Image: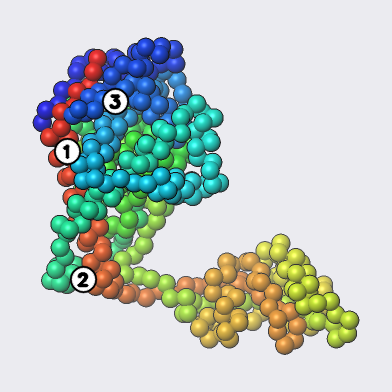
Amino acid sequence: MLARFTACACLMLGLVLTQSASAQEVDRIAAVVNDEIITLQELNGRVLMALAFSAIPDSPDARRRVAPQVLRKVIDERLQMQEANRLKIVLSAAEIDQGIGMIEQQNRMPKGALLGSLARSGIDAQTARDQIRADLTWLRVSGRVLQPQVKIGEEEITDRLDTVKERQGRPEFLAAEIVLPVDNPSQEDDARKLGERLIEQLKTGAPFAALARQFSRAPTAGNGGSMGWLSEIALDEDLAGPLSQLSKGQTSPLIRTSSGFAIMMLIDSRIAGQVANPEDAQVTLSQMVLPVPPRDAPPKPELMARARQLTASVRSCPALEDLGRSLGSPVVGSLGTKRIGELDANLRRAVTNLPVNRASEPMDGTAGIQVVMVCSRQESTQITLPSREQVRRTIEDERLDMLARRYIRNLRRSAFIDIRS
């Protein structure tokens, strides 16, 4: 690999990435990637954006701490874009806009809010667009180059199904990752300190996906670090243990792996092969029926709206029954415990996804306007096997992730990378 990392690179970054940096300084070269340069001005913008996305307070010390990892990510992006150019893969402006919209949705931001919030932090919108373009372009490159290499045979699918059968009843994890590689010993301290700082930010509420996009150097970074559903045997030994100790929504401590550091988040967990069958759930129901006046009754939509307003704030079955009695309901009380599949069609639709202690939408019944509530619910689960097509897609995703990691590693090894003083 033709790469040279100068000893004074970190000193240079610490000097320049301060709030008092002059225009002459930020126009200097931060790094050369093959025949392309990364200026200190570009790097400074990305550092500011990383701090903004990560909710890390901006300060000279914070900039110095995150700059080396941000620079390595920008170098990876430049390598990825060079590969895309070689393959003549170019994304349209509309595709970049769509990617921005997806990030806004994932962070529960209104449409158009992302670039506006960055502008208020003094960050050029083009900086964000460039990063999103690099992430999306790399997904396109990986799909074009790597997808044809993935050939899944029927025997392999059968073997995986046999493994799935053996794993039934064992835990599976929906996980996300932040990966901070250590390519040489000189990077160890910086990577560890950055990982510790990211964990501090996660504890204060910084979004995991935002940190992954800005700092992780795994192929999953563009997707907010999401790894999909994994079994213990599909995880590296370094990660399986810490992940199995987490509760839903928790993040791990900083994990030292064979290739660097990692932070894991457990999004959800389940038992392999076990799925809920809504039809078999047992629900205890309560109801009240509001009679419709035989004469001079308001229009039915108006009556439905009144019933909805009256029951919107009711949060228990006894409270629903008390309300019904106070309103003179002729039909009020428990419907008993029933299997959802045994209910009539209207009632089944009303309660299948109805949270416990929440009034249903009013229903037009023969005796009047009916409102029901689920007092308790006992879910029923069954063990099912995935289809052969689902298994095929799972193996493909695993293979593509492995090939993508190897792809970028090979690009790094064959590149000329010069971090300037």
Q: Whole-Å distance between the Cαs marked 3 and 2?
A: 48 Å
Q: Earlier in the sequence, mark 1 or mark 3?
A: 3
Badge 1 vs badge 2, beta-carbon distance below 8 Å: no
What residue lies at 24% left-to-right and 48% top-to-bottom? 141
x, y percent for residue 114: 50, 40
Residue tagged 3: 38
Amino acid identity at mark 2: Leu
Q: Whole-Å distance between the Cαs marked 1 and 3?
A: 17 Å
**Crowd class of label 1 (few under 14; some 14 to 19; many from 20; radius 10 Å):** some
What colour-coding does the image apply? rainbow
Amino acid identity at mark 1: Leu
x, y percent for residue 339: 52, 82
User: Which of the two discs, 3 and 2, sits closer to the camera?
Assistant: 3
Image side of residue 48 versus residue 404, left or right: right
Specify whether residue 180 is in view.
no
Q: Is residue 419 above or below residue 214?
A: above
Q: Secondary structure at mark 2?
A: helix
x, y percent for residue 23: 40, 13
What residue lies at 53% left-to-right and 43% top-to-bottom? 112
Comparing 102 with 340, the one in front is: 102
Residue tagged 2: 161
Figure quadrant of residue 195: top left
x, y percent for residue 397: 25, 57
Q: Earlier in the sequence, mark 1 or mark 2?
A: 2
User: Which of the two discs, 1 and 2, sits closer to the camera?
Assistant: 1
Residue tagged 1: 411
What residue lies at 46% left-to-right and 29% top-to-bottom? 124
- What residue occupies the far left of the structure in this picture? 1
Comparing 14 with 41, the one in front is: 41
What residue lies at 36% left-to-right and 62% top-to-bottom? 270
